[in-house]
Amino acid sequence: MAMSLSDPARRRLRTLGFLSPWLVGFSVFFAYPLIATVYFSFMHYNQIKEPTFVGLRNWTYVFEQMPLFGPALRNTLWLVVIMVAVRVVFGLSLGLLITKIKTGAGFFRTAFYIPYLAPPVAATVAFVFLLNPGSGPVNEILGSIGISGPNWFNDPDTAKPSLVLLSLWGIGDLMVIFMAALLDVPKEQYEAAELDGAGPWAKFRYVTWPSITPIVMFAVVTGVVQTMQYYTQALVAGKVASGVNIGPGSVIQPGYPDHSTLTVPQLVYQMGFQNFNTGAACVLSLVLFAIAMAVTMLLMRKRSGLLAAED
Amino acid sequence: MTSTALSAPASASTPERTSPNRGPAAARARRKRILHWIAVHSVAIAVALLFLLPFVFVFLTSVMSDSQAMSGDLWPDSWHWSNYKAVFETPGFLDWWRNSLMYAGLGTLFTVCSAIPVAYALAKFRFRGRRTAMLLVISTMMLPPQVIVIPMYLVWAQQFHLSGTLWPLIIPMAFGDAYSIFLLRQFLLTIPKEYIESAKVDGCGEFRTMVKIVVPMAKPGIAAIALFQFFYCWNDYFGPQIYAAQNPGAWTLSYGLESFKSAHAVNWNMTMAATLLVMAPVIIVFFFAQKAFVEGVTLTGVKG
């Protein structure tokens, strides 16, 4: 069993070799741009002339003067709180439902899962059509039973809730994660609880919940980070619902109606790629980074099972 | 609640018991089970209908005439299959397909090839900094892509003159994708050490062990990351918007679809036909690879 690879130096080299794609990727496509983002956040730069140092001017501009920063941050936080909460509760309910199904489980699992696969742009365009206030099938059906439907994506008060509805349609991934966690709860614990006379609620509260808490935690944290990046659906919904004709290269104001669907990532795009205010865009990026990082740290501390299977 | 209300008359009205050896309590329990079955399945059917109806409405609208698609009617008067033909004949639509296939195909290939050795090392090698490396992988996985997009765009556009193409999105995938590495590493943890050790006893080097032993055993995990990456690329909107927007010849289906709607401002039927055509490949592949999908989703959340 005398192998040449037992030599520690060669072993280290071998490890580096296997890790090298990631080491290159991490430094070139992650560490470098992150440092550059910090650098540009202190520069005035319009992507044509050389960058010039302006100290904290971009930072004070974003936090004190930028008119859309407040609405964008508020919308993003609204989505983070409401969308994540509603998704976790609904995903868990659907997971509980699917584990109780005896007949046709495969069919129901597929039916609940498949909307998750729909490309976000296609799903959003479809939802803007379905929820179209004038001629959409949903308001048509509501009208036929005597309810006058809301204006959905065309009303600042219901645009964000409509996005939540769209996200619930794509709940499949959460459902599968919860389903797997629920099936992992040891059966004997339910039997023991039943012998003690526990009803359905007590069984959920004292048997199911404690054993799925790590997964709920995981769902909340990844949900928060995903919602921090909420971009495609909000942008496409606003554009398509506004009905404006957008040719290539034309500049549109995101967030229709009344900036109600404007999120921080959309503002990053607008600042960086339409207004060419690189400094302000980088400040906004770093605000996103700070929030996402804080949440990730929380995840690492709580572990939530992410790194548990270390060995 | 319904079960207790209905069980009293139920047991009273069934003096002829299902099984002579069991008392009325057993019959009541059976009733309760049946009612429970009905309740659960009614809820499931209702929810399934709600989940599937959008597809049905989108499809029905896609075969309506131009004017009927705007009317709010739910059922087509006559079936205009030619809408689909018209979508394919829209200038650029076939190019979007080609570009989507290139982005998703090469992106997947690169991701799989780079993720396998990294995931293998992170799962099976013991070295100092292994935990830190894992933490860094997860941190990058959790990071919004908007955080680093601006400097990356500047490099690709100004140093490599590759804006207006999809290469700035495809090339980085040859250098590892955090999500795929994480997922595959979780899968590789489930492969028993003994297989790898016995391969080494037989004189296999680390690389040969990976190719000959680990890759064949990890096929389901590799299938899962390939599928997820393919769909990530197929569905990506932000990336193509950053790099391909200024050149319609480089647009992908996901990016083109939204501009398709803008160009056909009133034609919901055509838009819905195009929408279904963008969804179709994903859903067809899903039916062939359900197991790999569910395995992948579960792995990220549970087997951690």
Image (spheres, rainbow, N blue to C red):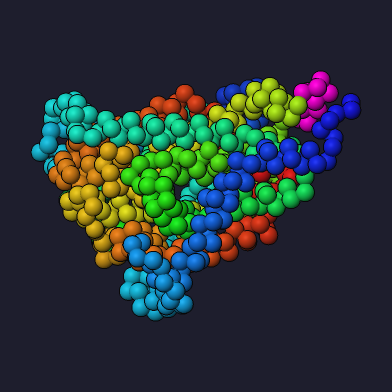
Give the residue drawn at x 84%, y 37%. A7
Eyeballing the image, is A57 above or below A89?
Answer: below
Eyeballing the image, is A60 above or below A246?
Answer: below
Image quarter of residue B17: top right
| Dominant secondary-structure state across the stretch colored magenta | helix
Residue B201 drawn in magenta: yes
Eyeballing the image, is B235 above or below A239?
Answer: above
Query: Which region is colored magenta?
Result: B192-204
Query: Residue A91's x, y, as percent?
Result: 50, 47
Horizontal side, residue B30 vs residue A246: left or right: right
Q: Is residue B276 visible?
A: no
Point out the residue furthest to the top here.
Answer: B202
Residue B88 drawn in magenta: no
Image quarter of residue B300: top right
Query: Residue A261's x, y, as percent?
Result: 33, 60
How many numbered marks are there?
0
Give the residue drawn at x 64%, y 41%. A20
Point out the residue furthest to the right here.
Answer: A2
